[in-house]
């Protein structure tokens, strides 16, 4: 699961244990868990409440007086092209 980075996790946990102490560590873990659960709940509620807002934006209208784009140019057929087409 950790891909060989387990020692980094152990070092972080030991530093936290030294800094906060064994009595305070469970309180910090519980508060962190509550914060993560609240964050997940808030994001899922926000996505469920506003599905209509997640749509593609409307295409912008060209400004008044703008020059429309030129139509595509069609090449004139030459006599050699007409013979090969028949």
Image (tube, rainbow, N blue to C red):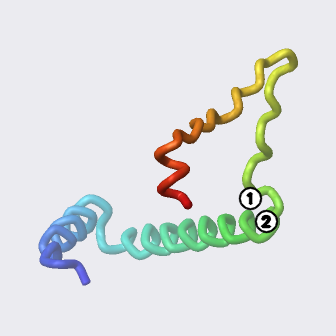
> What residue do we see at 26% from left, 59% from top?
19
Please say if 84 is above or below 78.
below
Which is more toward the observer, 75 or 31? 75
Q: Residues within 10 Å of mark 1 (few under 14, many from 20)?
A: few
Horizontal placement of 55 versus 80: left or right? right
Q: Are marks 2 and 1 in contact (CB under 8 Å)?
A: yes
Question: What label does residue 54 carry, if any?
Answer: 1
Residue 32: x %, y % from top left: 48, 68
Horizontal placement of 73 versus 65: left or right? left
The quadrant of the rendering that contains the N terminus is bottom left
Residue 81: x %, y % from top left: 50, 48
Q: Secondary structure at mark 1?
A: loop
> What residue do we see at 58% from left, 73% from top?
37
Which quarter of the figure has residue 42?
A: bottom right
Circle 2 residue? 51
Mark 2 vs mark 1, CA separation in Å: 6 Å
């Amino acid at each position: 699961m950790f891909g060989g980075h387990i020692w980094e996790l152990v070092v972080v946990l030991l530093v936290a244990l030294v800094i906060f102490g064994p009595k305070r560590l469970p309180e910090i873990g519980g508060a962190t868990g509550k914060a993560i659960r609240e964050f997940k709940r808030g994001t899922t509620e926000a996505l469920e409440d506003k599905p209509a807002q997640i749509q593609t934006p409307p295409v912008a209208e060209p400004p008044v007086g703008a020059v429309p784009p030129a139509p595509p140019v069609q090449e004139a057929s030459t006599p050699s092209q007409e013979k090969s087409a028949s």
